[in-house]
Image (spheres, rainbow, N blue to C red):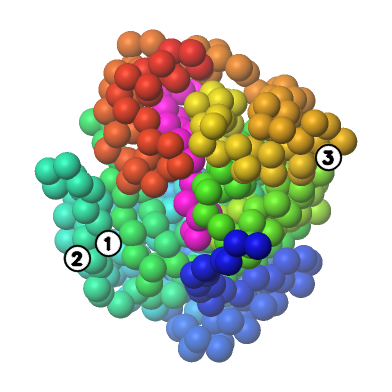
Amino acid sequence: MDSVSVRHVTPAYRTYAGNSSLAALTKELERTKSQRVVLICGASMERQTGAMALVEGAIGARLAGRFAGAREHSPILSVVAAARLLDECKADAVVALGGGSAVVTARAAVIVSAERKPIRELSTRRDGGSLISPRLSAPKIAQWIVPSTPTTAFAKAGAAVRDPETGERFALFDPKARAAGVFMHPLVASTAPGRLVLGSALNALAISIDGLQSGVDDPLAEAKLRHALHMLREWLPRITDDVDGAVGVRLMLAALLAGQASDVVGTGLAQPISHALGPRSRVGNGVIEAMMLPHTMRFNLGHTDRGLRAVSEVLDPSGARDPESGIAAVEGMLFESGVSRRLRDAGVEHEALDQVISHVLDDWSATTVPRVADRNELSALLTAAW
């Protein structure tokens, strides 16, 4: 039997789920002696008066300010405005309420507020032939998350923001900016439209599948990825236009498992492609990532066959359990979820593909995949998907 060498670091993280979960938020704020809390959300969440009252009630007299300007893809101006409010309120903690955009905006705002430098100087950048991630040394205030969608963002230490004018994506990474915990409440989980919940769940699906293909021999991460995939197979088909809160919470738990495991084993090529394509489409990044999965899985054939067989074992346990069966099972799930097979159907213009390829090549996550693609290979992948 081959020996195993594992380095699996599990950051401190507190997870609460269920109808009483927000009572724990009050206790956590007391435990950390937080006195000036800023709530960060989007405009649509601000209109959910029941959820807002529930969360603000849990924060209580500690609520020092509310920022409702979180937007899709976390544009720079929104992040800078949130950071400014943190400074004005002298915030000592942040509660992010909503989907991935609120979570990422809050994390990026905490970084910008603490580091006091332009975003471009704080982000991962290319230096010659290498991508360099600067060390961000300033202390960061505590963050807590009350999610409305099953985004994998609540497990992460990074934040990616976008310049809408140039299309540039700036990735900020700081382990000190990782949230301290998450509170999954069924009422909040029922506020997001089904299409947003589906997009986030598909992102968790893609991260689970790509994590299993990573080639990293880590039984702890693999257990999380397999169970995340098992949960997604069970609960993703139950997403409806009006999301049941219990379904939403189960999907959130699956997304948390997938996000935590991918921190250890990395991700796959579908993710950096979705980072570049998502803002150029009519759908969310998660949907684009799922659309690319069958193409990137086939690209990986011969390199990630053990992982592809693991996908097959979870999604199609009575099937052949070979790499091709894993791909077919994913295609079946996407068909059942109503995901289009072609990028053109998602509003992606063919003329944008060259620029997309350049952005993928400058994405940190594209350098850590099990099989790195060059410009010509990316062109072939995207053309086939278009």
Q: Between label 2 and label 3, give the one nearer the viewer.
A: 3
Labelled disc at residue 112:
1
140 up-or-down from 32: above or below: above
Labelled disc at residue 116:
2
55 up-or-down from 29: above or below: above
Instruction: Please say if the residues under marks 2 and 1 sit with CB atoms less than 8 Å apart.
Output: yes
CA–CA distance in space, label 2 to label 1: 6 Å
Residue on which the image places disc 3: 317
Give the camera-side residue of 217 and 271: 217
Q: Amino acid at mark 1?
A: Val
Q: Residue at x 48, y 88 (%)?
A: 33
Mark 2 burial class by Cα count in 10 Å: few <14, some 14-19, many 20+: few
Q: Secondary structure at mark 1?
A: helix
Place of residue 60 in the rendered image (x, y in percent of width and height, measured from the top left): 58, 77
Mark 1 burial class by Cα count in 10 Å: few <14, some 14-19, many 20+: many
Give the camera-side residue of 14 and 376: 376
Q: Which residues are magenta?
A: 262-282
For residue 323, side relative to residue 157 (left or right): right
333 up-or-down from 224: above or below: above
Residue 12 is covered by the magenta coloring: no
Q: Amino acid at mark 3?
A: Pro
